[in-house]
């Protein structure tokens, strides 16, 4: 059986790097720390060299001047130079300055220490060396992460260091007018060297992506970061479109109509991933929302039998599928009878089935053992078996409703096929009766994406056949904790439902929004179970309260030339972050140590 555990691990590993980069202090805290470093650090360290009341005043003026130009530069960068870059809001530019000043203060303090014992020029030289280090660091950061034009990134890299060194130059000129002229050449050379080293560093990291995927690493890095920081999906989806392939996507739909549309179950053979709002992650919700808007009936989108081999590449592909489904669904329902719900369990495998005319609605679960993605081959085998029994249009669903620490691999295709065959034979052997359908949806306000609840909420479809009332509950989430399914079924049976099953959509809109071993919370892991079960019971009861005599209709369509991207490529794209970091660690010392030695040698000659 296939699982997406390796992909989740790759995604979570990548997200840890991104989250650590953007775990920043608040704006007020960042400004306060910068003020302490500039006014307190620069001012007091300079006072150590000029220990007098006059020296204290001059040092504080220097510190206040530096702090003022830092804030001015950060404002210009965020509001003017990078105003269209959603990453570099004022808070992040100030936070970057904070990190830069921590680095610069190391050189300033070291320079003061040497200056006290060996002369003032040691302080000047080490302060200038700190300027060079900060210039290089900022150039690497802006070149690698900003999506602005090249010239704007270059100006953003240089503006703050050059403005900050200006008060020092004035201070040094006041002490000795020859000092600024003596080191002016160093400022020019160190600026050029820092930018050149940064460009070389980024270029070499870029080459890793070019060799692996034919695209540079840094634009991919920025696209991923834009999604993580600002929830922008388009930049990353451009890469998925480029790296993906075209596939014909099958969609099956079972709808129920009374005098108007009553409910619908839609199963696209698309995996709702890879994460957050990228690709088809939101497809269960989007398809539900748009179908409900068009037909005015409660709709659910449980998971089909497949894995990450069919993630959609972009929102454009989502809309292509949604448009085809809505157009194709405008047909009259004609099936007036259905069999009762049946369930067959053997060992670890449970298969449920209900037949509407010549349409089977069939689902698999291994609960309470882990029920993750299932191979497409299983769906094909089950459809062939159903066709042999005279069934023509079949909805085959992975309940995806149990996950624990252990991924069970002993479930074989043969075992699942045998249980499915027995369940289908049992279902088709039963007499058919007129049936009623009720449906309802609830959007629990207590639960969010971070808790594992997708935007589609909880949908219940209740089918009443021959005095057997069956509740199908679909939760917009990515699996659920082991044991919760059994709690839900017990609660529904206590509420008067004779049979029931609970499904999740496997939406990956809840993935990559929290950190952890999985990178998401399955339903019930971060939710209060009693609150969740109360919502499920109530929505099922509301659905049961609006039962109406219905007819069923099923269709299967193929959406041609849909752009998809597979699990292997997605996992490797995620792991590119780790690979890029390893490559960066390999080249960081040769590049920047060489730059540092060159600048130290230059300072020694001045």
Image (tube, helix red, strand yellow):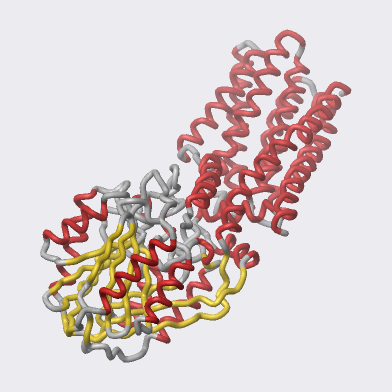
Q: Is residue 119 above or below residue 316?
A: above
Q: x%, y% of residue 414?
A: 42, 63
Q: x%, y% of residue 532?
A: 23, 54
Residue 35 relative to residue 419: left or right:
right
Q: Is residue 131 above or below residue 381?
A: above
Which image quadrant is residue 254 in?
bottom left
Q: x%, y% of residue 585?
A: 69, 36
Front one among 202 and 90: 202
Q: Is residue 448 visible?
A: no
Q: Quadrant of the C terminus?
A: top right
Q: Residue at x 47, y 40 (%)?
A: 27
Q: Residue at x 59, y 42 (%)?
A: 72
Front one among 353 and 229: 353
Q: x%, y% of residue 478?
A: 38, 57
Q: Residue at x 42, y 86 (%)?
A: 327
Q: Is residue 276 visible?
A: yes
């Amino acid at each position: 059986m296939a699982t997406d555990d390796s992909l989740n691990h790759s995604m979570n590993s990548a997200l840890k790097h991104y989250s650590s980069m953007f775990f920043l202090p608040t704006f007020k805290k960042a400004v306060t720390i910068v003020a302490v470093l500039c006014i307190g650090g620069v001012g007091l360290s300079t006072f150590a060299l000029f220990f007098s009341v006059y020296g204290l005043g001059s040092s504080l003026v220097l510190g206040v001047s530096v702090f003022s130009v830092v804030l001015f530069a950060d404002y210009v960068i965020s509001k003017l130079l990078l105003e269209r870059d959603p990453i570099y809001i004022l808070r992040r530019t100030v936070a970057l300055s904070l990190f830069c000043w921590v680095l610069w203060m190391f050189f300033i303090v070291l320079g003061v220490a040497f200056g006290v014992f060996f002369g003032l020029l040691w302080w000047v030289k080490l302060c200038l060396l700190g300027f060079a280090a900060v210039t290089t660091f900022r150039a690497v950061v802006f070149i690698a992460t900003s999506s602005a034009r090249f010239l704007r990134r270059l100006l953003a890299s240089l503006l703050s260091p050059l403005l900050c060194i200006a008060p020092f130059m004035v201070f040094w000129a006041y002490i000795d007018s020859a000092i600024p002229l003596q080191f002016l050449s160093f400022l020019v050379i160190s600026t050029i060297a820092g930018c050149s080293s940064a460009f070389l560093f980024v270029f070499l990291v870029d080459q890793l992506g070019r060799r692996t995927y034919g695209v540079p690493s840094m634009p991919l890095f920025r696209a991923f970061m834009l999604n993580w920081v600002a929830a922008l999906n388009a930049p990353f989806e451009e890469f998925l479109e480029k790296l993906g392939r075209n596939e014909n996507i099958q969609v099956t739909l079972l709808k129920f109509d009374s005098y108007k549309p009553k409910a619908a179950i839609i199963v696209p053979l698309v995996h709702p991933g890879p994460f957050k709002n990228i690709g088809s992650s939101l497809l269960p919700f989007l398809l539900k929302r748009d179908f409900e808007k068009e037909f005015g009936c409660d709709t659910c989108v449980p998971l089909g039998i497949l894995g990450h081999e069919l993630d959609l590449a972009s929102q454009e592909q989502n809309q292509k599928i949604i448009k085809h489904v809505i157009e194709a669904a405008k047909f009259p329902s004609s099936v007036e009878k259905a069999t009762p719900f049946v369930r067959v369990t053997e060992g670890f495998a449970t298969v449920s089935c209900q037949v509407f005319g010549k349409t089977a609605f069939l689902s698999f679960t291994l609960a309470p053992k882990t029920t993750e993605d299932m191979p497409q081959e299983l769906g094909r085998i089950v459809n062939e078996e159903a066709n042999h029994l005279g069934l023509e249009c079949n909805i085959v669903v992975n309940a995806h409703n149990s996950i624990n620490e252990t991924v069970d691999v002993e479930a074989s295709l043969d075992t699942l096929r045998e249980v499915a065959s027995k369940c289908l034979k049992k279902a088709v052997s039963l007499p058919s009766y007129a049936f009623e359908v009720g449906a309802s949806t609830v959007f629990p306000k207590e639960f969010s994406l971070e808790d594992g609840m997708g935007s589609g909420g909880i949908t219940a479809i209740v089918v009443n056949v021959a005095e057997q009332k069956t509740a199908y509950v679909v939760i917009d989430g990515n699996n659920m904790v082991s044991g919760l399914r059994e709690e839900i079924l017990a609660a529904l049976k206590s509420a008067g439902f004779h049979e029931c099953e609970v499904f999740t959509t496997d939406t990956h809109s809840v993935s990559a929004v929290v950190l952890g071993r999985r990178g998401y919370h399955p339903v019930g892991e971060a939710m209060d179970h009693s609150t969740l079960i109360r919502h499920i019971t109530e929505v099922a009861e509301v659905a049961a309260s609006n039962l109406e005599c219905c007819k069923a209709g099923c269709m299967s369509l193929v959406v041609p030339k849909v752009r998809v991207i597979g699990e292997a490529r997605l996992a490797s794209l995620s792991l590119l972050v780790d690979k890029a970091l390893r490559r960066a660690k390999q080249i960081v010392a040769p590049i920047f140590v060489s730059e540092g030695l060159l600048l130290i040698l230059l300072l020694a000659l001045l």
